[in-house]
Image: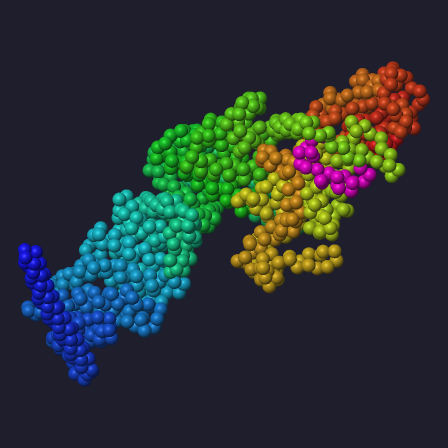
Amino acid sequence: MFSATQSSKSEFLDKARQAREERKGYKERERAATLIQALVRRFLCRCKLQKQIRKEVDDFFQDVGTTKRNALSIFKIARKLLFIFCQEDKLRFEKLCRSILGSMEVENEPKVWYVSLALSKDLTIPWIKQIKDVLWVSCNFLKKLKPDILQDNKLVTLYLTMLVTFTDTSTWKIVRGKGEALRPALTRICENIMGHLNQKGFYSILQILLTNGLARSRPSLTKGTLTAVFTLALRPVIAAHFSDNLLRSLLIHIMSVPAVVSHINTITPECMATIQTHDLLRKFTLFLSREEQCVDICVCLEGSHTLCLLGNLIHLGYLNEKVLEEEANHFVKDLTDMLSYCQRYVSQKKSNLTHWHPVLGWFSQTVDYGLNESMPLVTKQLQYLWGMPVIRTLFSDVLSKKLETQEPTPPPQPTTSQNNLPVKSLFKRAFQKSASVRNILKPVGGRRVDSAEVQKVCSICVLYQTALTTLTQIRLQILTGLTYLDDLLPKLWAFICELGPQGGLKLFMECLNNDTEESKQLLAMLMLFCDCSRHLITILDDIEVYEEQISFKTEELVTISSFLNTFVYKMVWDGILENAKGEKLDLFHSVHGWLMVLYERDCRRRFSPDDNWLRKDLKPSLLFQELEKGKRRAQLLLQYIPHVIPHKNVSLLRQSSCQIQSGMVAVTSAQTDHPNSLCLNTLQDGYDQLRRLPVNSIKGVIRVKFVNDLGVDEAGIDQDGVFKEFLEEIIKKVFNPALNLFKTTSGNERLYPSPTSYIHENHLQLFEFVGKMLGKAMYEGIVVDVPFASFFLSQVMGHHHSTFYSSIDELPSLDSEFYKNLTSIKRYDGDVGDLGLTLSYDEDVMGQLVCHELIPGGKTMQVTNENKISYIHLMAHFRMHTQIKEQTAAFIRGYRSIINPEWLHMFSTPEVQRLVSGDNAEIDLDDLKKHTVYYGGFHSSHRVIIWLWDILSSDFSSEERAMFLKFVTSCSRPPLLGFAYLKPPFSIRCVEVSDDQDTGDTLGSVLRGFFTIRKKEPGGRLPTSSTCFNLLKLPNYSKKSILRDKLRYAISMNTGFELS
């Protein structure tokens, strides 16, 4: 019974809870229904009201032309339209704006003027609020419009007119005449309106509009539109009396628009006059001269737009020379800070996902399409910085310096006669032309480095140096601009010569050890001077450097090269380079770069004394000791400036390195296999067998046997081979121009790869083989009489990969006449187009005329005054590189497989030629005599030997002595390091019989030779030689005259091995 009562109670409670929840749900549904009904009614009511207002607005504008609307009716209809305004009311808003502007144009009807409501006591505040709303809606439309679309362009004009009209009282008819007293009050209203727009982002709107209209290849903004935008941009700034906040906004949003100054100057010069009237450049310059302001602007703009602002400021400086001159210090500082920021920004933004910027190079910020399209104009603006007007203004202190001149001595007057007048006038003209010859510039010192003038020049140099390191993609343009004025660099050098108590080197060496800002600026000046001078010397041809002596006299180049040589040497030897990084490392590369350009030009055509490049205070023995100990400074010295050591010492070092490596190879060969032995019947056999040998085997010992047609070994003992003889023979054959692997240059008969070598089926393999054989000869210290064209040796050494390599400089070594003809085009004063040249080269190839295009489509492109410099360089590059590209590459591949390229870097082109072919100096008979070995009874006091040396020194000419040396050693030049390093040593042997009967020295033959005892008179025999042993086989002649005649005959007939 108890359990039944408990169960019924639970059921009752459950029913009560369910009933309660149902009542709660009902109330919620009822409340939701009420809310939905209210929302729907409100929506329907709002739709009805909007429809009603839109109908009322449409009716208002329907008959706008029939009656004049008073200002109050426009105000009321505008309030209604703004109340319901959305995107679909775009056309109605356009009509409202036209109606408002129309009311402002009516004459003598104050009640119609929309602005008249501003004077109503009750409507002033509502009217101000309404015009602010109307103008801001106009701004929002401007942000979205595209000026290049015709319909949008009309709307841009409409909304800009609205903004121009209601942000200034100048067009308001209400302030004319008696209303002039109202102007101050109305002006404050305009200022209030402008302040409101500024707070909401007015300058951002103008920036978007300008970017849309100008950041393209052809601007789409008209003169009126651009004038309106710029006027609107200036009004708030002028009204605020050029406050910092508004100058900041103007710089960030307006002056950072790509090339805006260029467009203003071109499209609306009146606005440019306004800029100059308000002295905006000076205000911008002074504002940015405060470091925190400049950093703030740059951070807001980031990299690309900072560059655009920079371009616009430079353009303003170009157009305002007076301001630029007066504010040069601040202007230079501003540009330097902005360029430095761009440089840091690019380095910070580098990543794997980078984008290409046409001026700054690679970094991670994307360049938008509009900015990319306008970059050519921005670049053009930047170019004003290194244009002549700006350079003349900034470097006025340097350029105003007059270089001291010396009056030349008048030439002796020729004897006068009536027929001699042309000669007399010629002398007169020559004297007048040379009347202003200036003195040679040398370090003199005397100018304080802390003077204002020096500080100014240093800061300008820092600016241009920063531009070079930041604007990496137009670096060459900057250098070309800075070198355009012929007198800038010599006057800058004169300025450098005057710095410090003694001038020049000592001051800059002290700066290297100081870390002050002053030292950095002085080093930046030196760095700029080096970069510009290097660029100038690189682009000048030999006539301009040596004959016309543009910018620098050759004597000054000697002084400068001595300065640079000492500076680089001190940096290396004093240990500064070992720890150098950043700016110091860049400085080293700049100074070293120009030093090497001067050195290479001097190697090609001398302008300096013989010992100009050597460091007499550096002992080679000390250098070699430090190299053995692995000292870093010694290694760096050999890497960067090996020319400061005498060439023979460097060659000795290279030879010792070769011997060490050769010894290592020999040990390896001995452990693994026997020396390579080759049996050769023809030179083709040598090629077939040697080309299959690995590089290490070629570097090791190679034994050669010559086999005659009967299969019998020819005479010649070289521990199973006569490799030197074989090497000389094979080199003699492959370098013979008749084979057409190599050709000779016109004039000096020097060798280079033949462009038509492809007639040989395997010509590239042959070139690689020849490269290996020449490398083997150098590796073994064997000199071969092979004179190479210097342009070809430059390529073998890798000089053509240098940024500053110029093909035109090397062209005289190929064809001096062709070089003169090409450079005459450069100096041609008339229209080059009249010459009928095209960007192509016609060549007679084995009887057929072949046209080579220098660039794709070149045979249809005419050479003009604009592209003649390109034509000259393209032609030179084609003749010396393109034509023989494959042959040269194959030769280098073979050559460098034997010779370490790092060894080549220690030598100049002429020095490498001397390594190949021996020294071109006169044969030192005393040295030869000292290092000669005698066999067969001969000795230094033997009468035949005394006669021989006397004949060589007294009776033979230098040419005959060279022929004698070639007769014995196969090379007419002495070894580079002297005869002590001739391998095998120069030897003379007394012989009694012909070579085919010669069995070597015996006790009897030696005694007979020693005591001058002859079996029979050898007067009928000729001297012979074994060039593989550098051995002269000399009969024991009875008379000096016989010896002289026989020897002269033998060397002139080129007799030698196995011929008597």
Residue 924 in view: no
In-image side of 602 versus 255 (left or right): right
Locate residue 1052, reporting x and y percent: 83, 34
Q: Which residues are magenta?
A: 680-701
If the image is split into quadrants, where does the N terminus sit?
Answer: bottom left
Query: Is residue 932 covered in magenta?
Result: no
How many marks overall? 0
Residue depicted at x 85% and y 33%: 713
Residue depicted at x 39% and y 60%: 369
Q: Is residue 11 above or below residue 915?
A: below
Residue depicted at x 17% and y 65%: 132
Locate residue 520, reporting x and y percent: 38, 35
Task: Judge by depth and name the residue closer to the eye, 853 or 109.
Answer: 853
In-image side of 100 versus 813 (left or right): left
Q: Is residue 913 above or below residue 223?
A: above
Task: Judge by depth and name the residue closer to the eye, 807 or 756.
Answer: 756
Q: Is residue 350 above or below residue 71?
A: above
Task: Judge by depth and name the residue closer to the eye, 1050 or 445.
Answer: 1050
Q: Quadrant of residue 983?
A: top right
Q: Residue furthest right?
A: 1016
Q: Is residue 68 above or below residue 473?
A: below
Residue depicted at x 45% and y 50%: 474
Residue 897 in view: yes
If the image is split into quadrants, where does the C terminus sit?
Answer: top right
Q: Quadrant of residue 1046?
A: top right
Locate residue 413, reporting x and y percent: 61, 42
Locate residue 1047, reporting x and y percent: 84, 29
Q: Quadrant of residue 1049?
A: top right
Task: Judge by depth and name the residue closer to the eye, 381 or 900.
Answer: 900
Query: Is residue 698 covered in magenta?
Result: yes
Q: Residue furthest front?
A: 1
